Structure formats: C-alpha cells, structure tokens
Amino acid sequence: MRLVLLGPPGAGKGTQARMLEKRLGAPQVASGDLLRTAVRSRTALGVEAKRYMDKGALVPDELVLKLVEERLSQPDAASGFILDGFPRTVAQAETLSAMLKTGAPRQLDKVIAIMVPDEEIVKRISGRRTCKNCGAMYHLIYDPPRNHNLCNSCNGELYQRDDDAEDTVRMRLEVYAATMRPLLEYYERAGLLKQIDGIGRPEEIQQRIVEALGPAGAAAKGKPA
Ligand code: AP5
C-alpha cells in the first residue's frame, strides 16, 4: 500500500506511521527523520536544511525531494510505503506523483489527514521525548517512559527536539496553516483524501485509519499494531 499521512506538527503522524508499518508491512518514510539524519551526519544538505528547520520553516523542495526520492528508490519501498510529513505543498505532491510514474507506473492508494486542534498540538509537542539511540517516541504525560529520561526498549537517553521550542512550534503551525488547505484540496480533487479525527488514544486513531483505508486496510497483514 502507498499511503500518505498528513496533519499538523504533533498530530501523531509518526506515532501512527510506526504502528501502521507492522500492520501494512510497508516502511515509514518520514521526511523530517531523513532531514534530521542528514543534520546529525553534518552532510552539506543537512547543514543547509538545519537553517530552515531551526526556524520552523519548510526546507527548500530540492533538498527534501532528493532525500525522499533516494529513500523511495530503496527495495523495501518498492511495493509500498507510508509517507509521513511529505508532501507538504502542492508542488511536492505533483513531484511525488511524477516520481511514482517513472519506471513501473505506481500511484498512491490513500491520503489520510489526521486533524488535531492547536491546543492539543501544543500539549503533545511540549511533552514529546525521543530516544537518541533508537528513535522510539514517548510523551511525558500520555506515554511516559518507565525510567525517567530513558528509553524502555534500549535504555537510550531521551531528548527534546530542537524545533519543539515554543517559538519554533508557533512558526511550524503558521507554516502548516498557510500550506495545508491547497494540499488537502489537491488530494480531495484526486479522490484520495480521508480526514480523520486525531483526538483519542493512539489505538483508537489507528482503528479510524484502518477503517478509512477500506478494503485495502482490512486486507492488510491484519496484525494489530
Ligand atoms: P517533521 O519531523 O515532519 O515534523 P512535523 O510535521 O512538524 O510533525 P512532528 O514530527 O512534530 O509530529 P507528528 O505528527 O509526527 O507527531 P508525533 O507522532 O511525533 O518536520 C520537522 C521539520 O522538518 C519541518 O518543520 C521542516 O522544517 C522540515 N520538513 C520536514 N518535512 C518537510 C517537507 N516535506 N518539506 C519541507 N520541509 C520539511 O506525536 C507527537 C507527540 O504526541 C509524541 O510525544 C507522541 O507520543 C504524542 N502522541 C501521539 N499520538 C497521540 C495521541 N493520540 N494522544 C496523545 N499523545 C499522542
């Protein structure tokens, strides 16, 4: 299955994508994670991208597209993927569509938009902690680690993302508000869009996504996340 998850910062795209990976047997491809890896590795692309990410602005298309195209060309994404955080603009959506048509023609199966109001987003982002070692995600209140500041799975140290500072989050929300409507309209016109309520426990939201996927979701590997 070729799926796109849209939604504001902190909507739970990453949380849901990781749960869906197991269920659908398709890898999560998160543009934010690809960018953060490039930043940590201090590649030329990462250094350039960091200037935008630190401000909460969108990274220029040519940088993001290069990373996403490379990732989607890997064998594990040949028969499906879960895109998280990409596309962010209509221009990126058009490039994705063109990208999928090269070689063996492929197209998206569904675009799910996870809708969450701003006040909940602020709560989710301010409590988010991520493992430095394995990338596992926690929330100080909704999903706290068993040991303070340590990952349940690998005991790695938990950290707060640089761009989760209050001012940067505000900017990310403004960017989202300015870019998302045309993107939603684009996928609505393509007949691919389903909007779901993102309030509730992660398992409840997962269930809404599976229902929104219709028969394709039901026919998936069927493993509960
Ligand atoms: P990116 O990494 O994509 O960040 P984002 O879209 O702002 O989304 P987040 O990762 O903050 O949140 P999420 O929706 O994944 O929520 P999560 O599951 O973590 O982008 C970062 C930056 O990179 C951008 O600002 C931009 O600069 C750049 N960038 C990335 N893609 C780009 C692109 N395509 N083009 C240009 N620039 C790009 O959940 C959040 C927290 O809530 C967690 O703590 C989680 O445990 C908790 N939580 C999750 N679900 C629930 C729930 N149901 N109830 C309670 N808590 C929950």
Image (spheres, rainbow, N blue to C red):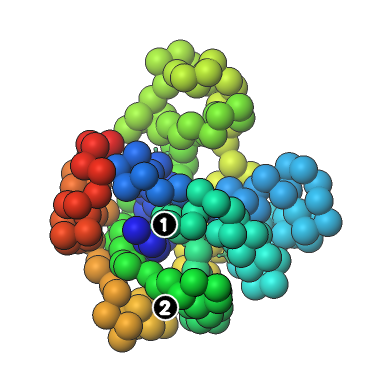
Label 1, on which residue? Answer: 80
For mark 2, give the secondary structure.
helix
Between 7 and 72, the one lying in front of the other is 72
Residue 204 spot, x, y in % from top left? 19, 44
Between 103 and 91, the one lying in front of the other is 103
Q: Amino acid at mark 2?
A: Leu
What residue sits 73% from the left and 48% below the top?
Answer: 39
Relative vertical location of residue 131 with respect to residue 152 in this rendering, above or below: below
The image quarter containing residue 52 is bottom right
For mark 1, give the secondary structure.
loop
What residue sits 19% from the left and 52% below the top?
Answer: 219
What residue sits 54% from the left and 34% below the top?
Answer: 135
Callout 2: CB less than 8 Å from ligand 1: no
> Badge 2: few (under 14), some or many (20 or more) residues near its Cα, within 10 Å?
some
Residue 89 in sight here: no
Q: Which mark is residue 118?
A: none
Quadrant (top left/top right/bottom left/bottom right) for the N terminus: bottom left
Label 2, on which residue? Answer: 183
The image quarter containing residue 143 is top left
